[in-house]
Image: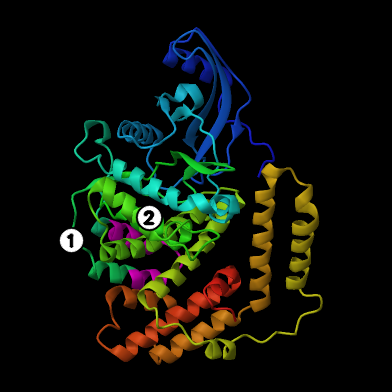
Amino acid sequence: MAATPLPPFDRGALARFLADASGADRVEIGEPALLPGGAINENWGFPAQFAGGPLDGAHDLVLRTDAPTGIASSLGRIEEFAVVRAAQAAGVTVPEPLWACADPAVIGKPFFVMRRIAGSAQGRIITSDPVLEPALPDIARQLGRELARLQTICPPRADLGSLPMIDPDEHIASFRAYLDRHPQPRPVLEWAIRWLEQHIPEPLPPVLCHRDFRTGNYMLVIGPGGAELTGILDWEFAGWGDPDEDIGWLCCKGWRFARLDRELGGIADRAPFYEAYERAAGRRPDPRRVFFWEVLANVRWAVIALQQSDRYLVGGARDLSTAIIGRRAGECELELLLLLDPHGAPPAEARRAEADAADGLRDLPTGADLLALGRELLRDELLPLLPPERRRAARLVATAMAIARREAAAGERPGQEMAARFAAFYGGGDNSLRRFAADLRAGAFEACAARGRGARALLWRMTMLKLREGNPGFLAAHGFGE
């Protein structure tokens, strides 16, 4: 990763576009800076001085354009611009959309320009800053009102005619199509998708869904008196769908950050959000429908996380943040087990009995020990010396080193254990993970209670083994420390 990313555009060409679009005599652009966040698209902030025209004067702007690699379900920038403009017209708090450009002659790819807004969208800060605590229930209420305003936008709309209409069946089909292409079987996801297929709720009239409406995608200005919501961000997944889809996504545990116990995006319980939403929308969310969409949200987030890591594995993106995010699919799988099989977790005594013994055959210090020492040096001594804008990257390096250390310490034992368990479960023949995933997709164990329990026990064990290496802190946060 380059320490100082260079903007992928010519400032002169952009200045000329801005002058033509705004009616200014000329525009001068200051030094662009790549803004944090935006895993799928790039956001470049820059100051601009307009001479003449309606915007005469100085303005802070953001250019939003495609990252070098992306994922197929993301809208194009011109479509996203139309969505943001429609949301603004409906009263949703968004950064003001100014101009869009599809002409590759300007910066080489489509983009749009919006006004830069103040605040922070960092989910860990929002969910853990003590200064915010008194204001968080009101933020939850504001989010309820924002979503209700968004859902006043309904099809058909000529300005949004290219947006996809995605119902549960299409979500399920897209998940399965992706898993069919993915090189590694994901039995927990196959099992959860089977549950979704059997529990699709009665449809409601479609509305405009943000499809990434969550903590981390709204900006707050934080002050001594609390917080103000200044904008909903990142509309690249928007489309027509069920009114409860965004509610399930907001409640997905993956977006709770530092407060897994707070079901509404890590900031509050659901009550203040539901009450404000009901008053504004005239409809009370049905917990059974929201539960379905929360399960679907965990499957979808797991698939998106895997698609993000595909940008490294297949697309060639040399970015640690993109590569490592695929590991979060295991967190979603644990949550799916907790939601759909809450009484199936193995007891603590059994988990302790299954804990792996140390290998002891390698020279000392082991590679795992050396990784641990290197990580401590990076985290404790080198990271504080870095400029603030580079510290997140250093923490990602430390996280990657911790994962590599745990995998090195475990060696081949987790795979050997699961191979033995599959052999015992099937009793011969094809004992592969791929067969197990295919059987779960087909509902092969649903007719026999004992076989169903055995299959779920395998799902629990493989998920815990993955997370023991990938994120043991997430296991411990759910009482599954080993």
- Name the side, left or right, on which 209 lies relative to 60: left
Rendering coords of residue 27 (x, y %): 54, 13
270 to 103, vertically: above or below? below
User: Secondary structure under badge 2?
Assistant: helix
Q: Nearer the viewer, residue 176 or 146?
A: 146
Rendering coords of residue 7 (x, y %): 59, 30
Rendering coords of residue 467 (x, y %): 55, 72
Q: Name the residue under label 2.
A: 272
Magenta stretch encompasses residue 412:
no
Q: Name the residue under label 1.
A: 202
Cα–Cα gap, marks 2 and 1: 26 Å
Q: Which residue is drawn at 52% across and 62% down?
A: 259
Q: Which residue is drawn at 79% across and 53% down?
A: 382
Q: Nearer the viewer, residue 243 or 65?
A: 243
Mark 2 nearby-residue class (10 Å; few <14, some 14–19, many ≥20): many
The quadrant in which the N terminus is found is top right
> What residue range appears in magenta?
171-192
Q: Is residue 432 visible?
A: no
Q: Which residue is drawn at 24% across and 54% down?
A: 167
User: Secondary structure under badge 1?
Assistant: loop
Q: Nearer the viewer, residue 128 or 459?
A: 128
Q: Earlier in the sequence, mark 2 or mark 1?
A: 1
Number of numbered markers: 2
62 to 68, vertically: above or below? above
Q: Nearer the viewer, residue 148 or 106?
A: 148
Magenta stretch encompasses residue 183:
yes
